[in-house]
Image (cartoon, grey):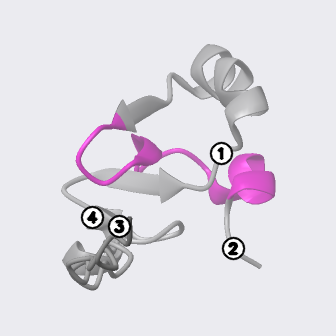
Amino acid sequence: MDRPARTRKPEPHRSAKPSSSSVNGISPGDVADGRLYLNVPFDEKDEAKRLFQAKWDRDLKLWHVAATTPRERLSRWLPN
């Protein structure tokens, strides 16, 4: 008994969703609303929180500290 070939619906094109930070134009090293944004790797987050009271911005998916924090102390988490 022959069966008809199955037809598949084409899946809609899925593009990578841009991160909130690129949509809002905020990236590590930027200062906005009194916050200095950082690029903190996951395994260093506890150190950033302990040393600099870094906070996670859920919308931007970036860590930030007070803009008054000296940049030279944060250089490892700032762009070159």
Amino acid, disc 4: Ser
Q: Element type at marker 3? A: loop
Q: Nearer the viewer, residue 45 or 17?
A: 17
Residue 11 percent location from the top left of the image = 26, 77
Sequence order check, earlier mark of 4 and 1: 4
Give the CA distance from mark 2 to mark 4: 18 Å
Relative vertical location of residue 43 with respect to residue 46 in this rendering, above or below: below
Q: Which residues are magenta?
A: 57-77
> Which residue in the protein does label 4 denote?
20
Q: Element type at marker 1? A: loop
> Which residue in the protein does label 1 denote?
40
Query: Viewer-nearest of labels 2 and 4?
Result: 4
Relative vertical location of residue 7 with respect to residue 65 in this rendering, above or below: below
> Which residue in the protein does label 3 denote?
19
> Which residue in the protein does label 2 denote?
79
Give the CA distance from mark 1 to mark 2: 11 Å
Horizontal relation, residue 36 to residue 42: left or right: left
